[in-house]
Image (cartoon, rainbow, N blue to C red):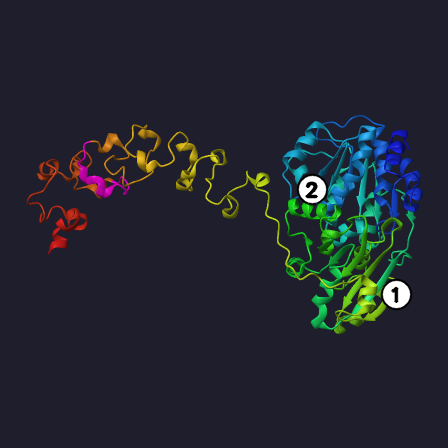
Amino acid sequence: MPQPLVRALARQGITAPFEIQRATVPDALAGRDVLGRGQTGSGKTLAFGLPLLARVAAGERARPLHPRALVLVPTRELAMQVNDALLPLGKAVGVFLKTAVGGVPYDRQIDALRRGVEIVVATPGRLGDLIDRGVCNLDDVEVTVLDEADQMADMGFLPEVTELLAKTPAGGQRLLFSATLDGDVDALVKRFMTDPVTHSTAPPTAAVSTMDHHVLLIPPRDKFSVVASIAARDGRTMVFARTQLGVDRLVNQLAAVGVRAGGLHGGKTQRMRTRTLAEFREGRTNVLVATDVAARGIHVDGVSLVLHVDPPKDPKDYLHRAGRTARAGESGAVATLVLPKQRRTTLAMLEKAGVEPAETRVRVGDSALAELTGAREPSGVPVRDEPPAPRRSGDRPGGPRRYGDRPTGERHGDRGPGERRFGGRDDRRHGDRPHDDRRHGDGPRDERRFGDRPAGDRRYGDRPAGDRRYGDRPAGDRRYGDQPRDERRYGDRPAGERRFTDHGGDGRGERRGGFRPEGRGREDRPRDERRGFGGRSPARTH
């Protein structure tokens, strides 16, 4: 390995390779295509990351919009995890990395590509979007890595992955790492890899000596109480539910009994997912409730228990869930809650996964439950959500809870209480006016700035919106201050003869006069019959 990389690893306390790294790194450094199968948590990230960095560092800087290496991963969280692991090592050898994932703005990703970035760590969907936008080209890619390839196939990404691999040069090096190498992954291998060397360092099961597997048989009515007591334990716990709705409901139920938990699933925004995962990693939250998709491949140090609230149906899902604990030689436990009707199917699934669990019947408060999982009674004091920090969200569109009675223009946030009167108006048009427009309706301001939107219509009734058209009208048009300037509706008004010349007749003179002493019953003015001045119309008086 290049000495700068070795020194950077030593600073992190890494001085000897794991088994998967010892097996694959020499062939990867030699430029061969590599198939690596290792149990989740066995060190696959550095197994492909170290030779990838070594090869890229030996070449030239990347051209704008043309990365030199590509790492494809199935989820946003895994992309960020890979980036975080390789970023300090890349700095040691002068290699720039950038993530390209969905759920975040395109701007920074596009800017990085335009400046030139050697390695892109991407999810298939966002990378495809960047290519379609013309801001990423894969013609210069020398090394392509597929991490968690089996999961990408399970999630339906195989067509996108196939299309992206087809855009890379045919002679490039391909490294494929996966917990299992099944049929779907084999299709990628046969099409895109040349004489690959296979290194399998563990059987595709979760039967490791440092992991204890328990099946807890519980009565249906005790299910949540058991979950809450386990979640209230000391130590870091990952809880898996089958659906997004199940995750959200469980987080709320746990909060109601005094257990703070974070929820992680694909329906949340990327900002919320990143914050939740950071709180769990940093220890601010000891419980993370997640779906399979969101938690695949996530590495968090110190997870001592994985709890399956809903037993997975697929053995591979069980292996991935269980792999969140007992990582890299640490110890851990996996507990699966099983209702009576789920027992047979769950045991059959575990047998396919190569797991022989210990079965235990438990109820809430049993000493066996506390002994196996560390369960204890939750506090019962509801957890209150921390209010969002307004400074971090001040530039977002108006939400009534965050802005209260503040105007939509944050630039005027330091105004006086008069802001409340401008809640729905554009502050920029009133920026230099006093806060209370009603007091200044007739002030010597420039009427053109108010256009047809005076602050208080009652104050401006004697000032028509367009002085050139209505300047010669009598004061009586304050009755029509809020009506559109449609000439047909004002046919009987004074000073309007220029607009009603097509009426002809000697009625003009009457209209010029501003009053109609005996015009109330004129048969040649049907408009007055329909729209006259209030009760003056014969249609209304008779």
Alpha-carbon span between mark 2 and mark 1 = 38 Å
Q: Which structural element holds mark 2?
A: loop
The circle drawn on residue 356 is 1
**Chain part drawn in magenta:** 472-486
The circle drawn on residue 155 is none
Q: Is residue 4 left or right of residue 442?
A: right
Question: Of circles 2 and 1, which is in front?
Answer: 1
Q: Please tell me whether residue 375 is drawn above or below residue 131 in the rendered image.
A: below
Q: Main secondary structure of the magenta part?
A: loop
Q: Quadrant of residue 353?
A: bottom right
Q: Please tell me whether residue 103 is drawn above or below residue 248 in the rendered image.
A: above
Q: Is residue 211 left or right of residue 221?
A: right
Q: Quadrant of residue 489?
A: top left
From the image, tell me which residue sits under label 2. 101
Q: Residue type at mark 1: give it.
A: Glu
- Viewer-side residue, 291 vs 364: 364
Identity of the residue drawn at 52% across and 42% down: 397
Query: Residue 61 placed where, x, y %?
Result: 78, 26
Q: Is residue 537 left or right of residue 202?
A: left
Query: Residue 275 placed where, x, y %?
Result: 68, 45
Q: Please tell me whether residue 455 is drawn above or below residue 230 in the rendered image.
A: above
Residue 273 lies in the magenta-colored region: no
Label whose residue precedes the other's in the sequence (2 or 1): 2
> Which quadrant is home to the N terminus?
top right
